[in-house]
Image: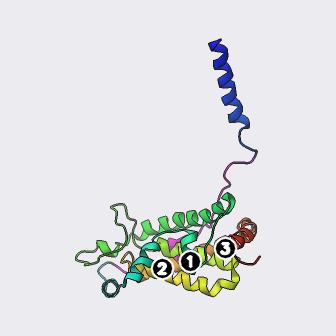
Amino acid sequence: MRLNRSWTFLASLAFVGLFGLPAGAAEPSCTDPAVPLSALLMPPPKHDSAQTKAELQELLRLQESRTPEQIKHVKEDDLRTLERFLGGIGIKVENLSGSARHFFDCIDSSVRHEVHEAKNTFDRTRPYRLPHNNLNTLKKLSDRDSPSYPSAHATYGAALGMVLAEMIPEKKEAIYKRIQDYGHSRIVSGAHFRSDVYAGNVAGAAIAASLLSKETFRNELNEVKAELRKAAGLAP
């Protein structure tokens, strides 16, 4: 009897394994922007250059003038999410479907992949890793922090923002300002030099342009657009 029960249990597991998921339930792949950022971007200033020294002085000046409101805003901007980006311009997004989440996760994944190669190629030292930098950065520090150039947060903000401007055109100007604000938070925090953020804006725009030029991505955008607008409380 025990043997029969064991076989019944194993057969049940096999049935769930074979038929428990609907056909085509595998996670869809992401569109590859294939943007060679290390070839697109100019090399960053050297760590001992006059420009790097001037940019470090700018970070110190911003650090001295940070207000409690700025500190709160900058710390919240450390999140790289759709909700945080749009929340910075007063747009609240709730209850997105899994497919919509996947669409926006793919933008983040594209940024991470493309920026990783560029960061490792340029290998610029973070401002708070320079000798005698005197920075009190608001970023959570780690020995595994990536190189400084380009800023991944600025790249993400630009890439996401350019795509969102296609989906919410009536908020385009506010979104463009948010791109700049999102990158500026990295400067105020002491996490990046200004030139890192500028390069991130260029990189993000290039990634977005590449994605938007692809039919597959455009089709996905059109499918998610109505849902995003509804979740944000905007007219269809």
Which one is earlier in the sequence, the residue at label 3 or at label 2?
2
Residues under labels 1 and 2: Cα distance? 8 Å
Closer to the camera in the image, 102 or 198: 102
Could you tell me which quadrant the C terminus lies in?
bottom right
Main SS class of the magenta portion in the image: loop
Residue 44 visible, this angle: no
Residue 211 visible, this angle: yes
Residue 232, which numbered label?
A: 3
Q: Is residue 197 magenta?
A: no
Which is more foreground, mark 3 or mark 1?
A: 3
The amino acid at mark 2 is Gly
Q: Residue at x 34, y 63 (%)?
A: 142
Q: Which residue is mark 1?
A: 158
Which is more foreground, mark 3 or mark 2?
A: 3
x, y percent for residue 84: 54, 72
Judge left or right: residue 155 versus residue 32. left
Q: Which residues are magenta?
A: 24-46
Please tell me how crowded label 3 is: few (under 14), some (14-19), or many (20+) other residues with Cα within 10 Å. Answer: some
Mark 1 in CB contact with mark 2 (< 8 angstroms): yes
Judge left or right: residue 227 versus residue 202. right
Closer to the camera in the image, 137 or 192: 137
x, y percent for residue 81: 54, 68
